[in-house]
Image: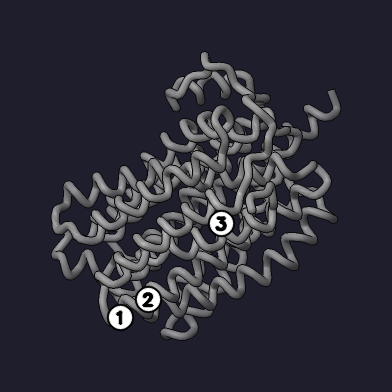
Amino acid sequence: MKKTSITRLYIIYFLFSIFCNMAHPITPTMFIEKGFPDFMFGVSYSAMSLSYFAGSLVFGTVGDRYGHIKTMAAVMPVYALSQFAFGVTRSLAVTVIARLVGGFFSAAVFVGSMAYLVDLTTGEDRGRHMAYYVACNSVGSAFGYFIGGIIGARSIMAVIVVQTVTVIFCGVLTVLLLKETGKGSRFTMSTSLNPFKTYSEKAGAMPRYLVTFLAAVFLTSLATTAYDNAFNFYIKDALGLGPSYNGAIKAVIGIVTLTVNFTINIYIVKHTQTRKSHIVSLLLCGISAMFVPFIKGLYPFFAGNVVFFMFNAIYLPIQQDIVTSGHDSRTSGLISGIFNSVRAVGMIFGSLFSGFIYEWGNKLPFFASSAAFLIGVGISAVNLKQYKSELSE
């Protein structure tokens, strides 16, 4: 029976996070077996991120107008088919096209689920639920990496088929279990579905401190994407490890992330000034990313990466809590879309940048990630001053 339910949303979002990440651990191996150049891992991911940027604003508005559940359920099969095409093609052009299609339609799921959560929460409990929401994605991603890595060690094609079927199944579950919030249409038909126009119109009405904060969001997304993409390719290319190792490592990181989200992140949103905590979390990310490339030995290197991803798990729930603070269900989709689109732009530049500089030196993306995080610290400090000034006026 359908119902509006945060718990059911978590279940579906968790399952989708598992299914949509199953192909990630096999992608480096798949690209190498297909004879693709090294930079292709950055190009393909940036193509997905570019269309994710466009889709974030389009589906934020579409979801607000027609319903986030309807939109999510409708796009999941399309995303699944794009993943199938991505897995079976041996063409560089088709690979990029499949990534473009997949990124565009996957945006509806991430934007819609976040907006749905905003609709069903209040300012008092939203921070706590954002931590749970991020935990669902992080732990689901880890399980997806693990399952994909284990299956991929035997058959890469089997991963693609399983992913296609399970994502479609997730869309069916969305239709059967979740009901729209019943808030009704929040935007008129004159609202633009052009993502660039929508963004420019909304950006013009934003307070200065929010624009500055989104600049920090861009940098952190760039930094995390550059690091994560380089790490995934590094363990295959430089260390010679197969998909199962990638999956196992991500599973360990997922357990650490789950622990962080249910302990540190809950404490931060309840008992600290989130903008100050945001600065500290980015500083820890920047420092850990800087030192990881210098670590010698396989297991110490993995341990250093677990530490980085632990710090990395802290900042996203803080950002989501900050950006949705003060917004209600009337603008939940649009504000979620803008936030995700800014993150997507960071993903575009992060994946492209890491992909190309990896060919100059396989440790350069880690240093670039550290630099982006540390610049984000400075911007976040400026943002804190702006926010305090705004409150005092």
Q: Which residue is drawn at 51% across and 25% down?
A: 199
Q: Residue 361 carries which label?
A: none
Between the C-alphas of marks 1 and 3, the distance is 26 Å
Residue type pointed to by label 2: Gly
N-terminal label among 2 and 3:
3
Q: Is residue 318 left or right of residue 306?
A: right
Q: How is the image coloured?
A: one colour
Horizontal arrangement in the rendering, residue 88 relative to residue 349 (left or right): left
Q: Which of marks 1 and 3 is nearer the N terminus?
A: 3
The nearer-to-camera label among 1 and 3 is 3
Give the residue at the far front of this rendering: 1
Residue matched to label 1: 153
59 or 229: nearer the viewer: 59
Using the rendered view, name the quadrant where residue 309 is placed: bottom right
**Quadrant of the snapshot with the C terminus:** top right
The answer to whether residue 284 shows anywhere in this view is no
Query: Nearest the camera: 39 or 300?
Result: 39
Q: Residues within 10 Å of mark 2 (few under 14, many from 20)?
A: many
Instruction: Give percent across and percent down for residue 314.
Output: 65, 59
User: The residue tagged with tag 2: helix, strand or loop?
Assistant: helix
Q: Distance between the residues labelled 2 and 3?
A: 21 Å
- Asked which secondary structure carries label 3, the reply is helix
- Residue at image mark 2: 149
In the picture, the disc for residue 13 is 3
Pick out the residue farthest to the top: 190
Q: How far from the left and from the top, in percent, is residue 253?
A: 54, 73
